[in-house]
Image (tube, helix red, strand yellow):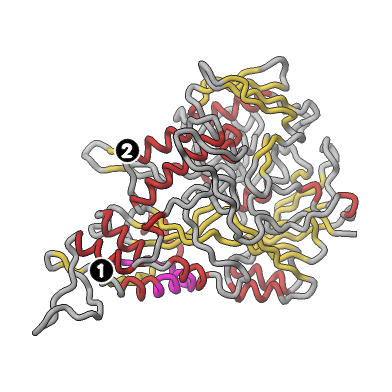
């Protein structure tokens, strides 16, 4: 859910009778980074940061650079006009933008950004409106061969122009776009976006130009490390650390490397053994926060059995989501609260439960739905059907589903076994199907060769613009077959599209949140993605590390990261 603002503004009741946002439920801490004032952080030192991939493409706007590891490193190096707090409330970052305003809504939406005149690229070039114009032209979807990660929002812009001087950007939209604050994060220099060749190749194995408290230091492919160093030309408060060394290794090796003293910070994931190993290491803390991502089951609407919405609803009601959450999170010291929204996390303003009856574990209601849809328990020889569940049939066909599991992922197998036992109670046989982990998405989920698949979606502070593609209807190609793009469940509809489109064009934050929730209620009825729970971030750190850890939606200030005195 690249997956989440304009939607995170002031609370309120939307017009048209929408209820006000619900109080934010308790789901653990929204952020856990050991906040310490800069004056209490020591000057100097190196931070060893574990990551689980050694990227080649460092242009985050390129499809190959749209990776969490690239984001983690470049957040210390590249400009972003806005910052998010722990509740996903977004405000201008004064290091780059001193003022941001919606200066017109009619006849067109106009946004004016006033840039910090001190902001410069590492080659000495000022950051100006021209950098914004070049990035818009690169990402607006004009189809010039660039392999862009997303055109969302950029394709709605009519023009990007110079304001009163080079440090003012005037952005005029052809169509209203509610999540306008999500754009230009990160911002790349105009040279990167000048032509498709530069866009695709100039950041391959290179970080040629930066504009942050740190600058590029070195790559070491043999050691799989990326080193960034304090930039003396940075116009803001200087970085506390001398350098940060990001070291890549397999995700399963990170907890052990941390426990052995080889790393100072590493995400240890949602594994209870890894959590325990890191927690019990010398001079260690595991910081926990409500992550911007959620675990779910995706249903394939093009599979023969699940093409019927009634069957999908029955399956959803036959699954005890709370029990699965408790099982998945056992040993992690984290509350197993179910998630009842596809767009907002419980730690975000705007969260509301829209699940209704579909989100409740109700085997009796699930059995009734299946009966009404024509799926009946076979009669026993010599008498009526017994109370003990049998596999339901329709026209001689058994009600048998496949549950796709990546090989070696115990979490997925455990979820499958629990769902298998639950669905047996309503007469559904769930068959666990294990496939190679590297093929899980590429050969099975994306092509649609599955019935139910468990995985996670990663969110941002912009819940609609980052996830609307997951639920949008497919585009029908010549010959009648639909192309679903990011919608891996292949379940949509005109009503959902209309609701999403209306929400994405609403510029009033409270009304936009209300409209997002209307769209969410429609998605629940269709049962595309069955949310389970908001996942915790578990980040192991040395006990003296300040201003870093499990950030949730909170954007880190890399200049303030360091060790306490």
> Whole-Å distance between the Cαs marked 2 and 1?
30 Å
Observer able to see residue 443: no
Which residue is painted at 68% across and 37% down in the image?
91
Please check the rendered image and state whether residue 463 is part of the magenta-colored stretch, yes or no. Answer: no
In the rendered structure, the answer to whether residue 81 lies left or right of residue 408 reads: right
Please check the rendered image and state whether residue 401 is part of the magenta-colored stretch, yes or no. Answer: yes
Q: Give the residue number, with chain letter if any, for mark 2.
A: 494
Image quarter where the C terminus lies is: bottom right
522 versus 31 height, above or below: above
Q: Which residues are magenta?
A: 400-418
Which type of secondary structure does the marked residue at label 2 adopt? helix
In the rendered structure, the answer to whether residue 57 lies left or right of residue 97 reads: left
Q: Nearer the viewer, residue 302 or 525?
A: 525
In the rendered structure, the answer to whether residue 22 lies left or right of residue 238 reads: left
Depth check, mark 2 against mark 1: the one in front is 2
Q: Nearer the viewer, residue 426 or 249?
A: 426
Q: Position of residue 407 (x, y in %)?
A: 44, 70
227 versus 78 height, above or below: below
User: Residue 17 falls in which quadrant of the image?
Assistant: top left
In the rendered structure, the answer to whether residue 355 lies left or right of residue 124 reads: left
Q: Position of residue 220 (x, y in %)?
A: 70, 56
Which residue is painted at 43% across and 33% down in the image?
502
Q: Nearer the viewer, residue 510 or 268?
A: 510
Q: Position of residue 142 (x, y in %)?
A: 46, 27
Q: Position of residue 366 (x, y in %)?
A: 29, 64
Q: Give the residue number, with chain letter if any, for mark 1.
A: 400
Specify few, some or many for label 1: CA neighbours under 10 Å numbering under 14, 14-19, or 20 or more. some
Question: Residue extending furthest bottom?
Answer: 382
- Asked whether the beta carbons under mark 2 and mark 1 sit within 8 Å of each other, the answer is no
């Amino acid at each position: 859910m690249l997956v989440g603002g304009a939607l995170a503004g002031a609370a309120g009741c939307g017009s048209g009778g929408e209820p006000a946002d619900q109080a934010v439920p308790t789901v653990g801490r929204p952020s856990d980074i050991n906040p310490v004032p800069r004056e209490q952080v020591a000057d100097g030192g190196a931070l060893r940061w574990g990551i689980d991939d050694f990227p080649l493409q460092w242009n985050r706007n390129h499809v190959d650079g749209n990776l969490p590891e690239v984001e983690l490193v470049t957040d210390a190096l590249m400009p972003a006009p806005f910052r998010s707090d722990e509740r996903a409330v977004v405000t201008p970052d004064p290091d780059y933008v001193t003022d941001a305003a919606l200066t017109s809504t009619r006849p067109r939406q106009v946004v004016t950004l006033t840039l910090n005149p001190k902001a410069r690229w590492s080659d000495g070039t000022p950051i100006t409106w021209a950098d914004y114009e070049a990035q818009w032209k690169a990402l607006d979807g004009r189809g010039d061969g660039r392999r862009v990660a997303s055109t969302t929002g950029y394709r709605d812009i009519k023009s990007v122009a110079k304001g009163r001087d080079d440090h003012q950007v005037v952005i005029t939209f052809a169509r209203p776009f509610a999540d306008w604050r999500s754009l230009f994060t990160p911002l790349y220099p105009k040279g990167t976006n000048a032509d498709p060749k530069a866009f695709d190749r100039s950041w391959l194995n290179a970080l040629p130009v930066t504009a942050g408290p740190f600058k590029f230091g070195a790559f070491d492919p043999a050691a799989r490390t990326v080193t960034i160093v304090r930039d003396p030309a940075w116009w803001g408060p200087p970085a506390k650390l001398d350098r940060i060394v990001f070291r890549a290794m397999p995700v399963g090796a990170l907890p052990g490397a941390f426990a052995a003293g080889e790393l100072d910070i590493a995400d240890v994931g949602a594994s209870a053994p890894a959590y325990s190993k890191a927690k019990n290491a010398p001079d260690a803390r595991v910081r926990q926060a409500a992550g911007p991502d959620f675990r779910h089951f995706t249903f394939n609407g093009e599979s023969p059995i699940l093409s019927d919405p009634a069957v999908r609803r029955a399956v959803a009601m036959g699954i005890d989501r709370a029990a699965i959450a408790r099982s998945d999170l056992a040993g992690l010291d984290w509350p197993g609260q179910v998630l009842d929204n596809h767009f907002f996390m419980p730690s975000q303003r705007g969260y509301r439960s829209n699940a209704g009856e579909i989100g409740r574990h109700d085997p009796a209601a699930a059995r009734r739905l299946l009966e009404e849809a024509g799926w009946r328990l076979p009669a026993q020889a010599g008498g009526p059907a017994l109370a003990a569940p049998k596999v339901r049939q329709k026209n001689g066909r058994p009600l048998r589903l496949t549950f796709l599991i990546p090989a070696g992922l115990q979490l997925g197998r455990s979820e499958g076994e629990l769902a298998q036992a639950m669905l047996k109670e309503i007469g559904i046989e769930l068959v666990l199907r294990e496939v190679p982990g590297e093929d899980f998405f590429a050969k099975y989920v994306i092509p649609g060769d599955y019935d139910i698949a468990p995985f996670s979606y990663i969110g941002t502070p912009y819940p609609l613009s980052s996830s609307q593609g997951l639920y949008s209807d497919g585009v029908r190609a010549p010959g009648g077959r639909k192309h679903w793009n990011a919608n891996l469940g292949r379940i949509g509809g005109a009503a959902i599209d209309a609701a999403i489109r209306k929400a994405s064009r609403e510029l009033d934050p409270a009304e936009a949140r209300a409209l997002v929730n209307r769209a969410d209620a429609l998605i629940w009825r269709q049962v595309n993605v069955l949310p389970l729970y908001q996942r915790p971030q578990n980040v192991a750190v040395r006990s003296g590390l300040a201003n870093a850890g499990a950030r949730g939606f909170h954007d880190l200030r890399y200049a303030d990261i360091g060790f306490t005195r």
